[in-house]
Image: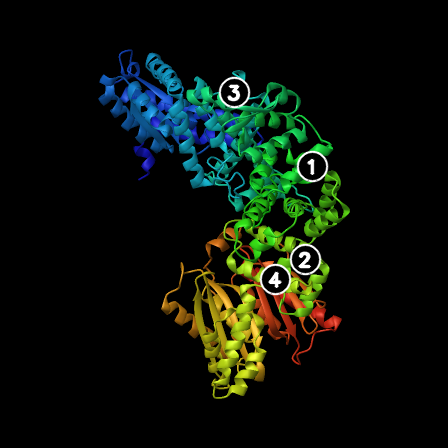
Amino acid sequence: MNSAIRLRPSVLKAKETLAQGREKLRQQHDQGSPGVQVCTRLTDLFDQIVLDLFEAALVDLGEDGPKGLASQIALVPHGGYGRRDVAPYSDVDLMILHHPKAYARAAELARRMVQDMSDVGLVLGHSLRTPSQAISLGLSDATIFTSLTENRYLTGSVSLFRSLADQLRSRACRRFRSLFHGIILARQGERIQYGDAVYLLEPNLKRSRGGLRGIQMVRWLGFARCGEVEIDSLSLLGLLSDRDRQILRNARNFFLQIRNEMHFHGGKSTDQLDRGEQLRLADRYGYVGTKGMLPVEQFMQQYFLHSSGVRSVVSNFIETIRPRSILSRSLAPLMTHRVDRDIYVGPSVISTSKRWKEEKSGQISEILRLMDLANLYDRWIDHPTWESVRLRMQTIGEIQLDDEGRKRFLSIMSQPPRLGELLGRLNELGVLEKIIPGMAHAKGLLQFNQYHKYTVDVHCIGTVRCATRYQDRDDALGEAYRSLRSKRILHLALLIHDLGKGFEEDHSDVGARYALGTAAKLELTSREAESLRYLVQNHLVMSHLAFRRDTTDKELVVRFAIDVGSPELLKMLFVLTCADFDGVGPGVLNDWKVRVLAELYRAAMGHLGVEVEGESSSRTRNKRQRLEQLAQKQEDHVWFQRQLEALPPSYLKETPVDQIIEELSQLRTLPEQDAFVSTNYLEDRDVIEITVGTHEEAAPGVFHRIAGAVTSLRMSILSAEINTLARGLVLDRFFVVDQESNGEPADERMEDLAAKIKKMVLDKNDAPPNFRARWTSRASRTAAHVQVLPTQVKIDNDTSEIYTIIEIFAHNQLGLLYTISRTIYQLGLNVAIAKIATHLDQVVDVFYVADDEGRKIEDEGRLQEIIARLGEAVDEFSAQRD
């Protein structure tokens, strides 16, 4: 039997009204109706349904007529429904306000309304309160209070509603101080849950910082302050500037239209702007992109400009109305002294005169002077001063720096304390883009991948903040930063290094031009200008060499050192490289990466005539001496000595002495057709180290076999080292992350891993392993929404004297490394060294290869064949996985 037959006629009619109304509004939305307009009409639709069901319920309950329940209650929409900005599938927040003696009758009505609304297909968030109950709850709970501020009358007793509205307004204003702090605290908790950073790359339209909730908070605080929620009213009262009012209005229209589209498209309530939805929305709204920017990056830049604008307005509004204690207002004048007739230093803040705000708030030199004073006195600059600067920056165009402005900016850039914070403030105020070419372009610019967590401008400023923290590090990185004679060029390079993104041309080349433009604007010396250009143009070089090349190749290190040219510039490049990793997001720069970069830094410094003694250098020397002593005690000490001489430096440096002796001993007694596998969990890196020892003849193509075994167990390979020792012995190391373990894997898991690898290594059939097709890690699921860039295969025949280097850039997928390494084997190439760099959505695999006779591949036709075969193999694999 059709369940619809059992529904009341009023419910059936309401269901039809809802379906027809939603469809009509969807058509209007599709035709381009503004978001606010669609939300208002949706509210009218919900009002009609609520009223129809209410009237029908009164009749059925015998409560209609002049003396019925309608005279004892009032229906009061609140929250988003009261604000009239409901989305297509929003909940309906409705309070049934009642006289104390009408509770039982009102409760019966509430039960009927909840059931009917649910049958219609709407979620009713209801409450049953007397005016005094509602006010008492609202004044004691910030979340309830904020919802009640958005109240409006729908039907029922007008006097009952007025009692609530009037008392709530008057009592709220009297308790402004406690309500202010309660609202701020509640919002902070929500921001932490849904993303505190305004530039969170998968924001929640409603709850993330700078979203709809920020606009709503202005309304709630406005009500607590003066009984007004409307943005226009707050502007008329002087609490918001006209420009801020327009910023909030434009952002609200943008957010609501996007939210309506997400609801209509999904057929449900959804506010999370994930990667897949970003791509869809960019296409839906006709963003076409450029050769340097994807359509989705253009769309998200628009979003971030709105959200950062909201964040700025909300922050300024909060400071404008923040309650001040009588004591602090009384004591401040007594504890304040003048720097000059326009600037005052108080016990906690620096403030300015009305004349300064009117005449000097647009002068860069004066703004920077305030920042110098803030550093000198360790004080904050008060809100009215910053507000005057922010408003002035919105009305003026390009600014020519005078000598005083240049000197002050360079002075600030030379001082690590609070530098990141000051640059962030200058960026928010719109000052930084007047000084640094390219900063305006980078504002809100998204990098649509799963590696970067912040927009370009925030990332660049974040790297400066990271670098200044190295002052306190007790390692090579800290020493390099502290020993810089002048830090301003480093800080400028960090601020500029990624500003060239978003153009067709390589961002390092565009950034180099920005660097020269900045140098000219700041009138740097020619030597400083060249250093700045070099650092920006080559900011990726050191990480490229450290993680994609064999840095035990002395010729490579020599060429790198010669290219850098000076110890001071090398120090800056080292710090810049670390800070660039660090500024991507938490945990990206780990101790292992610092150690790898520091080793390259020390080696290059040595070739520049500067010895940088490191713990690892002396430890390696001591380790080699200890190994040589132990080798003399072995039965076949000549064999051990020969193997020690052939040990790769990286293996020698990172492997404990006992482990080296143990693994060499296993290799010495290993039968020709056998292999051994050991696994070790490295807690400091949260990775598993896998060591495989065998004979070259026993396991040709051992690399791709191991890759297949590891991947088939749902482990992600981070890096690999393929080491051929003396007498045809092979000792390989893989570093992998186990996607199915949190922390150290169980012993059974490690044993299974070792057994599976050994089986694959010795399997003569060379059959591909079975990959679990349905398994995807969280990272893989997230990365699935990222636009897949074309596969690139590059050949480098210049870096190494004895090997051809193959670089492969591809979309990261389960089994990709196995496919690549097996194709290399089928091409008749032997892998000597492999560097595997895996990011969430992309992989850069680097292989040092030689032919069967151990020679570098020089023939151009053969090189083109390698490029073509590898590209085809990756593309075919990707097509099969899709």
Q: Amino acid at mark 2?
A: Pro
Q: Amino acid at mark 1?
A: Lys
Q: Earlier in the sequence, mark 3 or mark 4?
A: 3
**Element type at marker 4?**
loop
- Circle on res. 263: none
Q: Note whether 16 is above or below 99 in the view shown.
A: below
Q: Amino acid at mark 3?
A: Leu
Alpha carbon distance from label 3 to label 4? 58 Å
Residue 768 showing in the rendered view: no
**Where is residue 204 shown, x and y percent of the image?**
48, 39
Q: According to the image, label 4 marks what residue?
A: 612
Alpha carbon distance from label 1 to label 3? 36 Å
Q: Residues within 10 Å of mark 4 (few under 14, many from 20)?
A: some
Q: Earlier in the sequence, mark 2 or mark 1?
A: 1
Q: Note whether 197 is above or below 234 in the view shown.
A: below
Q: According to the image, label 2 marks what residue?
A: 567
Question: Of residues 531 and 65, which is closer to you in this image?
Answer: 531
- Circle on res. 407: 1
Q: According to the image, label 3 marks what residue?
A: 239
Alpha carbon distance from label 4 to label 1? 34 Å
**Element type at marker 1?**
helix
**Would you say the residues marked 4 and 1 are in contact, meaning their CB atoms lie under 8 Å apart?**
no
Residue 241 showing in the rendered view: yes
Q: Amino acid at mark 4?
A: Val
Q: Earlier in the sequence, mark 3 or mark 2?
A: 3
